[in-house]
Amino acid sequence: MPESGSIDAPTLAALVREGDILDDLVEHLPAEQWTTPTPAKGWTIAHQIAHLAWTDDAATAALSSTVDDGPFLGYLEAAAADPAGLPDRTAAEGAAATPADLLARWRRGRAVLADHLSAAVRDAPTQRFPWFGPPMGARSMATARLMETWAHGQDVADALGVIRPVSDGLRDIAHLGIATRDFAYAINNITPPETAFRIELTAPDGEVWTWGPDDGSAGESVRGPALDFCLLVTQRREPEDLALEIDGDEAQQWVSIAQAFAGPPKKIMRAR
């Protein structure tokens, strides 16, 4: 497996490690196993890696663009022309390559992206870069790539029936899931609640991570394992399958639509 290099920022390091974990899962698969179906309808393991390769390339283009100009505008135009179908189409195109070529493409792309993210975090920490959702800073971009790599890695792990090492980036993924709360409401054409929710998540080492009011004033709350919450906001598991305690009608509504990634809402994707 290729060397990951050295990145000081914890989020970037977690992103690189997450890619390495997934690489370990697929590196020695025989060619026929790349066609193994994953939980995503119509997607094989090859589709999952192809999607990550495409979105890593898109992120690199975004980091070379402004919100008004640059190579990422072509990606936005493609997304606007076919918002629901673009992920399937680009994944299918990438999956048509041989496993060796696809793996090499993904490895090259994520290495280039890591270099661009490291430079952006160092040299342009306050700059906003375009994306399929709202523009974001370099650190948020790194968190988004970490989240997607982890989520699609979960699909591959599920397809292979294996359990991956615990991610170093669970807290970042959880934070992104919370920060995108109002985005999830907006893409479902629902007015977000004005009140803040209390979120209490237990890390794999037993530490409790918290967000929101700590004075008992929050009537809406979500509590439980951090891993389960991350599976929820990446839509890898349904709320009823997770060990999460959800209090309040608004919190119940949120967990049914929570979405930490850009793209159409669950109700559209599941109806296809």
Image (spheres, helix red, strand yellow):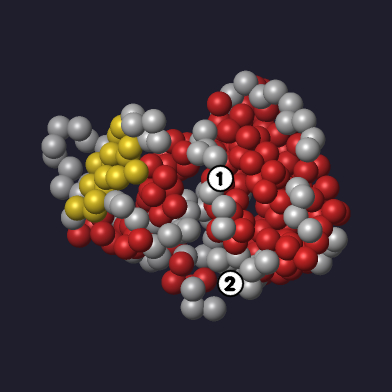
- Asked if disc 2 and disc 1 are in contact, CB closer than 8 Å, the reply is no
Q: Disc 1 marks which amino acid?
A: Arg
Residue 102: image quadrant is: bottom right
Q: Earlier in the sequence, mark 2 or mark 1?
A: 2
Question: Dot 1 corresponds to which residue?
Answer: 164
Secondary structure under tag 1 reads loop
Residue drawn at (84%, 62%), measured in percent from left and top? 97
Q: Is residue 263 visible?
A: yes
Question: Dot 2 corresponds to which residue?
Answer: 41
Residue 179 vertical position relative to residue 3 in the rendered view, above or below: below
* Nearer mark to the viewer, of 2 and 1: 1
Report how many numbered discs are placed on residues in the image: 2
Is the C terminus in the top left, top right, bottom left or bottom right quadrant?
A: bottom right
Mark 1 surroundings: few (<14), some (14-19) or many (≥20) residues within 10 A: some
* In-image side of 239 versus 145 (left or right): left
Residue 100 vertical position relative to residue 265 in the rendered view, above or below: above
Residue drawn at (50%, 39%), measured in percent from left and top? 166
The location of residue 209, given as percent across then percent down, is 33, 33
Residue 168 vertical position relative to residue 134 in the rendered view, above or below: above
Residue drawn at (17%, 43%), measured in percent from left and top? 218
Secondary structure under tag 2 reads loop
Q: Disc 2 marks which amino acid?
A: Lys
* In-image side of 148 versus 186 (left or right): right
The location of residue 116, given as percent across then percent down, is 72, 33
Q: Residue 246 — which label?
A: none
The location of residue 237, given as percent across then percent down, is 43, 60
Return the residue found at the far bottom.
272
Residue 122: image quadrant is: top right
Q: Is residue 90 visible?
A: no
The location of residue 252, given as percent across then percent down, is 26, 59
Mark 2 surroundings: few (<14), some (14-19) or many (≥20) residues within 10 A: few
